[in-house]
Image (cartoon, grey):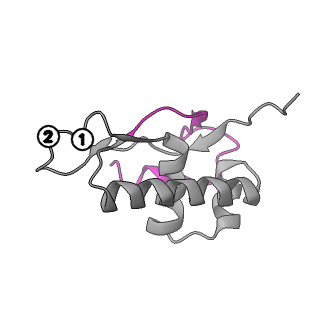
């Protein structure tokens, strides 16, 4: 029996969750779905310049988990760009961080892009 999945801490939801080519009418049925936790790993590592270890600490998961999520998210981004597919960000097993949460390791920084 597999171990239960640990919910990942996500600091904020994307402001836009649908991306894709403007010139392709057929992209809806060929869309790629990126989960919220995959989006969060891309945001933390590529935008916030955190290491995988720092990202893992913020999301309350193991570094190897972050590494796997990151590889999958980058693969989805590459498919969307190279094959001209629509990218939809939704779903996943996550818990949304709150500013008042005692275990939050982002110290309110997760909200700076939303304010």
- The residue beneath circle 2 is 25
In front of the other: 84 or 2: 84
In front of the other: 8 or 71: 71
- Check disc 2 and report its element: helix, strand or loop: loop
Disc 1 residue crowd, few under 14, some 14–19, many 20+, Cα 10 Å: some
Marks 1/2 in contact by CB < 8 Å: the verdict is yes
| Rendering coords of residue 86 (x, y %) | 29, 45
- The residue beneath circle 1 is 27
Residue 16 in view of the camera: no
20 sits left or right of 93 in the view: left
15 sits left or right of 70 in the view: left
Q: Residue furthest right?
A: 1
| Rendering coords of residue 20 (x, y %) | 24, 49
* Image quarter of the N terminus: top right
Tell me if residue 14 comes above or below residue 43 in the rendering: above
| Rendering coords of residue 16 (x, y %) | 29, 43
106 sits left or right of 36 in the view: right
Segment colored magenta: 89-115
Asked whether residue 100 is drawn in magenta, I would say: yes
Residue 34 in view of the camera: yes
- Check disc 1 and report its element: helix, strand or loop: loop
Tell me if residue 80 comes above or below residue 18 in the rendering: below
At 34% across and 40% down in the image, what residue appears?
A: 31
């Amino acid at each position: 029996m597999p171990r239960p999945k640990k919910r990942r801490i996500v600091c904020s939801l994307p402001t836009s969750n649908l991306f894709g080519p403007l010139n392709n009418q057929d992209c809806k049925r060929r869309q790629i779905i990126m989960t919220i936790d995959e989006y969060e790993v891309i945001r933390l590592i590529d935008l916030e310049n955190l290491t995988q270890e720092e990202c893992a600490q913020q999301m309350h998961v193991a570094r190897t988990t972050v590494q796997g999520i990151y590889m999958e998210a980058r693969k989805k981004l590459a498919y969307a760009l190279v094959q001209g597919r629509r990218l939809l960000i939704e779903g996943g097993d996550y818990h949304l961080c709150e500013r008042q949460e005692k275990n939050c390791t982002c110290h309110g920084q997760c909200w700076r892009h939303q304010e």
